[in-house]
Amino acid sequence: MTAELVVKTLNKAISGTKSDWSDLTIQTDLGSQYTGAKFNQVLVKQAIKHSYSRKGTPYDNIMIEAFHAILKKEEVYHSTYKTHEEAQLAIFRYIEGFYNTRRIHSSLGYLTPNQAEKLALAA
């Protein structure tokens, strides 16, 4: 994973959504792609706070690890992708077409992520 890839991914994630990210904190490990100038320039520009995992503490990223486990169980392990683009499109469809819009989460009061975000933005 390169700094260019994580910057591109972060820019893609924040484009077209809310304009004020100052209440957002992003959690990453201490990889060079997250500690480098390119990634941090995007964070500063968007006023996103950065939180790093501590060395030797694997549970700092437990939420994203749980998401990856769900993604693999519900999408990836049930599919065979012929190309990288096919995999990318299928995973995008899973996240945007199902996970965020129809999959309820007990930790969100049995709301979907999109419903929880709308409530948070309305508050």
Image: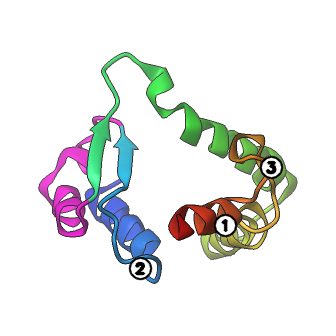
User: Where is mark 3, residue-wise?
Assistant: 110
Compared with 117, 93 (above or below) is below
Quote the CA–CA distance across marks 3 and 1: 12 Å
Residue 87 against residue 31 in the figure, above or below: below
Give, as a three-letter code, the residue at label 2. Answer: Ser
* Residue located 76% across and 73% down the image: 97
Q: Residues within 10 Å of mark 2 (few under 14, many from 20)?
A: few
- Which residues are the magenta region? 29-47
Q: Is residue 28 left or right of residue 84?
A: left
Closest to the camera, between mark 3 and mark 2, is 3
Q: How is the image coloured?
A: rainbow
Q: How many marks?
A: 3
Q: Secondary structure at mark 1?
A: helix
Q: Residues within 10 Å of mark 3 (few under 14, many from 20)?
A: few
**Residue with the mark numbered 1:** 114
Q: Residue at x 16, y 50 (%)?
A: 36
State if disc 1 and disc 2 touch (CB < 8 Å): no
Q: Which residue is mark 2?
A: 15
Left or right of residue 120: residue 31: left
Which element is circle 3 on?
Answer: loop
- x, y percentage for residue 35? 20, 45
- Residue that extends furthest to the right in the rendered view of this protein: 78
Query: Is 18 on the left or on the right of 82, as rendered?
Result: left
Front in this rendered view, residue 35 or 80: 35
Which callout, 3 or 2, points at the residue further toward the start of the chain? Answer: 2
Q: Earlier in the sequence, mark 2 or mark 1?
A: 2
Quadrant in the rendering for residue 98: bottom right
Q: Nearer the viewer, mark 2 or mark 1?
A: 1
Residue 39 belongs to magenta span: yes
The kind of residue on which mark 1 rests is Asn
User: Residue shown at 25%/68% (left/top)?
Assistant: 46
